[in-house]
Amino acid sequence: MSQSAAHSASRPLRIGLAGLGTVGAAVLRILRRQENALASRTGRAIRVTAVCARDRNLDRGFDLAGLSWFDDPVALARSDEIDCLVELIGGSEGPARAAVEAALAAGKSVVTANKALLAHHGVALAELAEANGVALAFEASSAGGIPVVKTLREALAGNTVTRL
């Protein structure tokens, strides 16, 4: 393992969470609750370090202290404070698309559950991710979050799937 790879594995994966609605709030709670289990399974701590949402003052029922707040999702996506953007804003255009494109262009992997964004721009976003050597993960955007994408890609690679 190279020295830089060892260094990145020793520090937490820093998540920037764009969108703190029902899904975003649930993701933050799960990542906090499962922090030790995730670190054990992945060999690296995974921590939300920065967030972005429309209303900073909304009571979401949990503490945001210790997290960096961004009013602009594109600024969050480009921030040196994060390694990976989790986009849960929604919509095929506007801030969701701009943030995902900015993160990928900045060399940050993206996780999204945004069906509309992928339906309209999925190919272009996948090409941008590939050009920058990062991942565009979207398992939660398909089949109601059932982990089917990885299965189709890997376990069923030898089969011809014509419809789902």
Image (cartoon, helix red, strand yellow):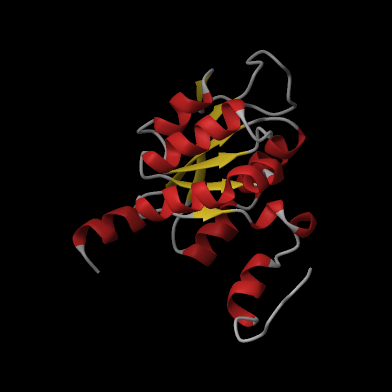
Q: Nearer the viewer, residue 143 or 76?
A: 143
Image quadrant holding the N terminus, namely bottom left
**Outermost residue, bottom side:** 158
Q: Residue at x 39, y 33 (%)?
A: 81
74 displayed left or right of 151: left
Q: Residue at x 78, y 59 (%)?
A: 143
Q: Residue at x 62, y 69 (%)?
A: 150
Q: Is residue 11 in view from this perspective?
A: yes
Q: Position of residue 60 (x, y in %)?
A: 73, 25
92 displayed left or right of 162: left
Does 54 sit above or below residue 67?
A: above
Q: Position of residue 52 (x, y in %)?
A: 57, 26
Q: Position of residue 94 (x, y in %)?
A: 60, 26
Does 159 sit above or below residue 95?
A: below
Q: Position of residue 6 (x, y in %)?
A: 27, 61
Looking at the rendered structure, the number of numbered marks drawn on it comes to: 0
12 displayed left or right of 99: left
Q: Quadrant of residue 58?
A: top right
Q: Residue at x 28, y 60 (%)?
A: 5
25 displayed left or right of 69: right
Q: Nearer the viewer, residue 143 or 42?
A: 143
Q: Nearer the viewer, residue 24 or 113?
A: 113
Does 162 sit above or below residue 30?
A: below
**Outermost residue, left side:** 3
Q: Is residue 50 in view from this perspective?
A: no
Q: Nearer the viewer, residue 119 or 153?
A: 119
Image quadrant holding the C terminus, namely bottom right
**Outermost residue, top side:** 57
